[in-house]
Image (spheres, rainbow, N blue to C red):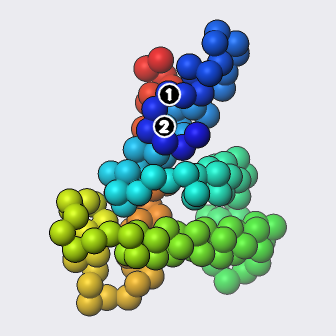
Amino acid sequence: MYRIGLGPLEASRGAPVDLLGVMQDLSLAVAGKSMFSLEIDSFGPQLRGLLLIFAAGIGRSRASDFILPRWVPTVTTVPRARFRQHWRTLIQAIIARRRASHSPGAQRDLFDLLSESYEDREEDLLADEVSTMIFAGHETTGLTLFWAC
């Protein structure tokens, strides 16, 4: 399902299909391949699930985000902390899989460039960069493909 291609469209045989979901899955597969040289199959459903949870609710700005200091608990404090924990664990698992599966003589990808630029810094900075690129790149590309169709 998360391999690069339009299999869900071909399988629908003219039946209604969630085109936005298909395009977002496609863009996630492309992001996984171009950034990590990985098929994103094993992580795709978890990534999409977390991305949808974030975009549909806890990622939306609220008035309290702008008015209150960050240390003041709000309705979204606990859900956002849980999301960050799950997201960080998943991103670290992807990074670990990429490092374990990539041979030294393999073709370079975006992760190689990011790793080199963060080699002397904390691993958390690299995970933050990867997170931003996956979320922003996947969402915008998926929406663009959706509207283009």
Q: Which amino acid does label 1 sit on?
A: Leu
Q: Which of 50 and 55 is in front in this view?
A: 50
Q: Which amino acid does label 2 sit on?
A: Leu
x, y percent for residue 67: 66, 67
Q: Mark 2, mark 1: which one is toward the viewer?
A: 1
Q: How many marks?
A: 2
Q: In this view, does 75 lie to the left or right of 90?
A: right
Does residue 63 lie above or below 7 as drawn? Answer: below
Q: Quadrant of the N terminus?
A: top right
x, y percent for residue 38: 41, 57
- Can residue 132 be seen from the camera position used here? yes
The span from disc 2 to disc 1 (Cα, nearest Å) is 7 Å
* Mark 1: few/some/many CA within 10 Å (<14, 14-19, 20+): some
Report if the CB atoms under discs 2 and 1 are less than 8 Å apart: yes
Residue at the spot x=65%, y=57% of the render?
46
Task: Kindly state the secondary structure of the residue where label 2 is placed.
Answer: helix
Task: Kindly state the secondary structure of the residue where label 1 is placed.
Answer: loop
- Can residue 143 be seen from the camera position used here? no
Q: Is residue 66 left or right of residue 3?
A: right
Residue at the spot x=58%, y=57% of the render?
42
Q: In this view, does 135 lie to the left or right of 125?
A: right
x, y percent for residue 90: 58, 69
* Mark 2: few/some/many CA within 10 Å (<14, 14-19, 20+): many
Q: Give the residue number, with chain letter if any, for mark 2.
A: 26
Which quadrant holds residue 101?
Answer: bottom left
Q: Nearer the viewer, residue 71 or 54?
A: 54
Q: Give the residue number, with chain letter if any, for mark 1.
A: 6
Q: Nearer the viewer, residue 129 or 47?
A: 47
Residue at the spot x=70%, y=58% of the render?
58
2 or 1: tag closer to the N-terminus: 1
